């Protein structure tokens, strides 16, 4: 729920709508975390790649070695070859009750400023 709160603040500060969330690294293997993030934020979540740091490092080296002409080309290659898992929002009445409680607690301790 804190993820969702921060996303709303980012949208407010940038005046831009966030279309979705991507979780990378080890956390992308946590089904509960990914689904809870989708439910809390109301946004689709893409999970993966698990080894994002390694992939990023390899891409930088591949660009330097001339395998890819640009970062955009390297990113396209990854997008075409890595399968992400999608989690769509599916909140329940119990979840919505917990979200209201979280909002009350957040308001009390963080405020709306």
Image: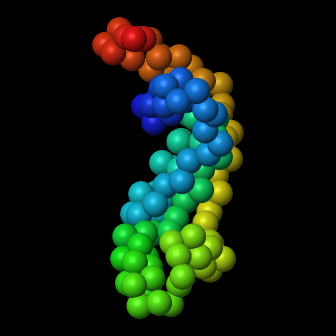
Q: Does 46 sit above or below residue 61? A: above
Could you tell me which residue is drawn at 56 percent across and 47 percent down?
Answer: 21
The quarter holding residue 111 reads top left
Could you tell me which residue is drawn at 39 percent across and 63 percent down?
Answer: 26
Image side of residue 23 versus residue 41, left or right: left
Q: Is residue 31 visible?
A: no
User: Which of the colour schemes (rainbow, by chain, secondary structure, one colour) is used?
Assistant: rainbow
Image side of residue 60 versus residue 15, left or right: left
Q: Position of residue 35 (x, y in %)?
A: 57, 47
The quarter holding residue 85 reads bottom right
The C terminus: image quadrant: top left
- Front in this rendered view, residue 39 or 67: 67
Q: Does 76 sit above or below residue 94? A: below
Q: Is residue 66 visible?
A: yes
Could you tell me which residue is drawn at 41 percent across and 73 percent down?
Answer: 56
Could you tell me which residue is drawn at 65 percent across and 25 percent down?
Answer: 93
């Amino acid at each position: 729920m804190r993820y969702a709160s921060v996303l709303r603040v980012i949208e407010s500060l940038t005046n831009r709508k966030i279309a979705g969330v991507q979780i990378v690294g080890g956390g992308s293997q946590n089904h509960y975390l990914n689904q809870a993030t989708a439910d809390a934020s109301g946004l689709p979540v893409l999970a993966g790649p698990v080894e994002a740091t390694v992939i990023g490092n390899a891409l930088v080296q591949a660009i330097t070695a001339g395998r890819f002409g640009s970062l955009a080309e390297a990113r396209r290659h990854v997008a075409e070859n890595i399968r992400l898992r999608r989690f769509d929002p599916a909140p329940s009445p119990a979840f919505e009750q917990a979200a209201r409680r979280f909002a009350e607690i957040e308001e009390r301790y963080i405020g709306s400023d």
